[in-house]
Image: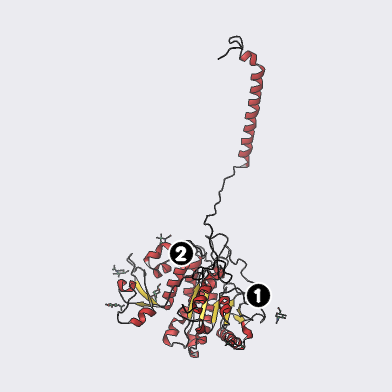
Amino acid sequence: MLTKNQLDSRSFFFEIAPGADSGASGFITLLAAAHALRNATQNAQPNRTILYTFFQGETFDYIGSSRMVYDMDNKHFAVDLDNVHSVLEIGQVGLRADSKLWLHSDPVSRRNSSVNEEVRKLIDNLQSSATGLDFTVQEPNASQPLPPSSFQRFLRARPIPGVVIEDHQSSFSNRFYESMYDNAEYLKVTYPPNMTPEEQLEFVTDTAKALTEVATMVARALYKQAGGAEEQLPNINADPQIVTQMLYGFLVRSNNSWFQQLIPSDFIGHLKDSPTNFYIGVHQQSSEPTLLVQHLLANLTGSTMNITQENCQNQREDENDKESKHLYSYMWVQGAAPTNSTKREGYCVRSTVRLSKALSPAFDPLRDFTSKDYSTWTESRWKTIKGRIFLVASHELEMLTLGVGFGVLLTSLLLTYFVSSKADILFSSGREPTNATY
Ligand SMILES: *[C@@H]1O[C@H](CO)[C@@H](O)[C@H](O)[C@H]1NC(C)=O
Ligand SMILES: *[C@@H]1O[C@H](CO)[C@@H](O)[C@H](O)[C@H]1NC(C)=O
Ligand SMILES: *[C@@H]1O[C@H](CO)[C@@H](O)[C@H](O)[C@H]1NC(C)=O
Ligand SMILES: *[C@@H]1O[C@H](CO)[C@@H](O)[C@H](O)[C@H]1NC(C)=O
Ligand SMILES: *[C@@H]1O[C@H](CO)[C@@H](O)[C@H](O)[C@H]1NC(C)=O
Ligand SMILES: *[C@@H]1O[C@H](CO)[C@@H](O)[C@H](O)[C@H]1NC(C)=O
């Protein structure tokens, strides 16, 4: 059981790739669903394991997902491709029209009856999970091909049952796909005037409420898909407060009091008073969304440990417990400062969150630089785009300048004429012989 999502986005200007609907709407929904499932999966572990994945470099020919599928296929990953039961991908879900979401599947792999049956089950499951929520989910025309998605890379390897959730039926509802205008305003993440940043962080927008509903459906469907107990389902609900804080953090300002608490102190310089840039490139700034999502996922799915900073940073909770040492990762985060103090009280978070490099298999290990199967995108130059602005003088001043110019020209013409016509008087000869040589 795998659920996944794209992390990055693209635009003409590499500094401004807000990817609000194309990236953020989906991965925020998945993070909220993961959070909603924390208690349910801890209380009653379902039969199948749910693996949440967030891929980088998807906009450049699916670098992240093609790497993972390659590793899974070659048994270099924690999970083999054979052990993936089904895939649920959350695409663009921020702009649903007429309260409808669309469940896209692949008509080619569904020609296989056993795959078709599993896809059918997953769709029924999602549809029943959406009952009681303020939207409906529908299937597009069965012959319609699967839209661009990371799931394509899995289907390339073998027919795996899966569904991609999108806010469009056939053509994108997102008119600013991979553009600098796919931003918070386009997703209607706006706040009443005169709010402080702290109030904005907490303010639950309508977009947050809408995405919370989607996250609730995703969480319930995942739980059922993983074989969880039916009677648990009503207890699984996503938290609109968490969703609104994530929307604010990624689309408005990553340097906010909540994100500051969740990250280690050496990462604090990466937070900015502007929207997160999801452009992926060789420039180191592009790792910012990865690290933020890593620490958010740890906070939302992990647990806090009462251990010292030194033990935490050495990834060691209990020397004797070899099992958990390899299973969990430990992160020391800044935490909040108590009310009348300025010193933050850090703590240790234990989670099963892992990072894995999204490097195209074409470069390593295949070294096939003309690969037709894997991404071979490179950056040939790194140059900032610059513009210069000049002030234009007022019309009166321009006319005055022109007039004065003409005046000076006429005066000098007159003066020259006068001087040359009276030259014999002004420069009277006779004092110096014309044939004088020097
Ligand atoms: C359908 O797919 C499954 C698993 O991928 C495979 O084992 C089976 O042979 C396929 N069935 C047909 C009719 O191709
Ligand atoms: C589905 O699409 C096919 C071809 O694109 C078309 O012939 C068919 O009428 C469509 N079915 C429905 C129910 O829209
Ligand atoms: C982030 O916000 C804090 C105040 O909360 C401020 O002191 C700090 O300078 C900001 N960092 C950046 C990089 O703007
Ligand atoms: C997550 O962050 C909140 C505060 O932002 C904190 O209260 C909570 O303990 C954290 N949980 C984990 C598991 O780190
Ligand atoms: C954390 O552990 C210390 C000693 O190991 C103990 O004194 C303290 O009460 C514990 N704190 C919590 C919140 O459990
Ligand atoms: C912090 O402030 C509270 C009241 O606001 C006060 O009761 C408490 O003693 C203060 N703690 C310290 C350590 O100053």
| Mark 2, residue position | 197
**Ligand 5 quadrant assignment:** bottom left
Q: CA distance from mark 1 to mark 2?
A: 38 Å
The quarter of the displayed image where residue 112 is located? bottom right
Q: Position of residue 180 (x, y in %)?
A: 57, 62
Residue lying at the far top in this picture: please name it.
430
| Mark 1, residue position | 170
* Left/right of residue 428 with respect to residue 282 in the rendered view: right
Q: Position of residue 361 (x, y in %)?
A: 51, 71
| Dot in front, 1 or 2 | 1
How crowded pointer 1 is (Cα within 10 Å; few <14, some 14-19, many 20+) is rated as some
Numbered-mark total: 2
Task: Give SS at disc 2.
Answer: helix
- In the displayed structure, 381 sits above or below 207; it is above
How crowded pointer 2 is (Cα within 10 Å; few <14, some 14-19, many 20+) is rated as some
Task: Give SS at disc 1.
Answer: loop
- In the displayed structure, 281 sits above or below 149; it is above
- In the displayed structure, 320 sits above or below 365; it is below
Q: Earlier in the sequence, mark 1 or mark 2?
A: 1
Residue 269 shows in the view: yes
* Residues under numbered marks 1 and 2 in contact, where contact means CB atoms less than 8 Å apart: no
Q: Position of residue 364 (x, y in %)?
A: 49, 69
* Left/right of residue 161 with respect to residue 261 in the rendered view: right
